[in-house]
Amino acid sequence: MTGRAPEVHVAEAGSSGPLLLCLHGIGSSSAAFAPQLDGLSGQVRVLAWDAPGYAKSPDPDGPLDLDGFADAAADVIRSRGTSAHVLGVSWGGVIALRLAARHPDLVDSLIVADSGPGSGTDPAKADAMRRRAAELAELGPRAFAERRGPRLVSPDAPPELVARVVDTMAAAVRLPGYGYAAESMAAADLRPELPAIGAPSLVLCGDQDRVTGVEASQVLAGALHKTAYVIVKDAGHLANQEQPERFNAWVLSHLRITAHLPEQEF
C-alpha cells in the first residue's frame, strides 16, 4: 500500500498564460528550474515542485510508488487550476508520463526532457537504482552529490554550473524520500502504456546526456503518437539548466502549438 503525500512546496512565477508544472529529476528540486521560472514566466504561469520528501516538501506518511508521485503532482495541478502542461526532467519525465496515463484530463501536453521509460526496462539498471538509497545513507547528501552531480552535465560544462548542480542535489536529497523515488524508478517500465497517452508531447534530450542517453528518449518519441523529438546541442543530462535559452525556446514553440501561445515580439 502506498503512502500519501502531504501538500508539497511549489515555486511559482508568472501571473498569466497557460499553466506549466515542472517536475525535477531524482537528485534535484524546484531550484533546477530557475532558468524556466525566470525565462518563461513572461508568457506562462510556471510552477516547479519539490517532490514529496525532497528539499522544502515534507516527507510522505509512507512509501510512495510511481502512482503516488503522479497523484501528488495531480494534486498540485488541481490546487492551481483545471489542467496544466507538464514538463518533466529525467525521473520527473517518468512521473509526467504516468500522470498523463493516469490523469489524462489534467494534462494538456507533455514536455519530457532527458528521460526514458524507467529503470525497470533492464534488471541491471533497476538493481543499480535500488542501491542508490544505501549509497546516500552511507555517504550523506553532500558527498553523494559530489559523486553524482558532475556526471549530470556535459564534460565541457562551466565549473559554476557543476557547483550549482552539486549544491542543489546536496540540499534536496534525503531519506526516506529519495529511497521511495529510486524504488519508483526501479519498478517502472512505461513501454506498454506509452502508445495510449494522448497528450501532445515534446521529447528533448541533450546530445551529451551520459545518464539516460539519447536512445532512451528515442524510445519515448517512437512510442508516443503525438510527438516531436529534439536534440539539444552542447548539453548533458540537465539540458534545461545547461542550455536554458535553447531549451526554453523549444518549450515556447511547443506551447505556441498546444496552448495557442502568441508569438513573442522582440
Image: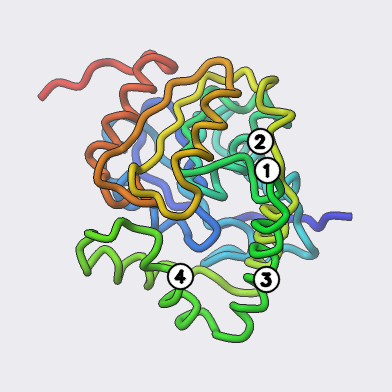
Q: Which residue is mark 3?
A: 131
| Mark 2 vs mark 1, CA separation in Å | 5 Å
Viewer-side residue, 119 vs 159: 119
Quadrant of the rendering where the C terminus is positioned: top left
Q: Is residue 223 above or below residue 190?
A: above
Please rate how many residues cluster around mark 2, counting C-alpha atoms within 10 Å: few if below 14, some from 14 to 19, many from 20. Answer: many
Task: State the image coordinates of residue 247 (x, y, percent, origin top left).
Answer: 30, 37
Q: Residue at x 26, y 31 (%)?
A: 249
Kind of residue indicated by mark 4? Arg
Give the labeled residue for mark 1: 70
Residue at mark 4: 148
Kind of element beneath mark 4: helix
Whole-number angstrom distance, CA of label 2 to CA of label 3: 26 Å
Residue 99's disc number: 2
Mark closer to the chain start, 4 or 3 = 3
Disc 2 vs disc 4: Cβ atoms closer than 8 Å?
no
**Element class at badge 2:** helix
Disc nearest the viewer among 2 and 4? 4
Q: Give the residue type at disc 3.
A: Arg
Could you tell me if the residues under marks 2 and 1 are in contact, i.e. CB atoms within 8 Å?
A: yes
Q: In this image, 5 relative to 201: left or right? A: right
Marks 2,3: beta carbons within 8 A: no
Q: Going from the N terminus, do you reach mark 1 or mark 3 first? A: 1
Tag 1: amino acid: Ala
For disc 1, the neighbor class at 10 Å (few under 14, some 14 to 19, many from 20) is: many
| SS type, badge 3 | loop
Measured in 3D between alpha carbons, the distance from the residue under mark 1 to the one under mark 3, in whole angstroms, is: 23 Å
Label 1, label 4: how far apart the Cα atoms are? 25 Å
The type of colouring in the image is rainbow
Identify the mark nearer the N-term, 2 or 4.
2
Q: Nearer the viewer, mark 1 or mark 4?
A: 4
Q: Is residue 243 left or right of residue 29?
A: left
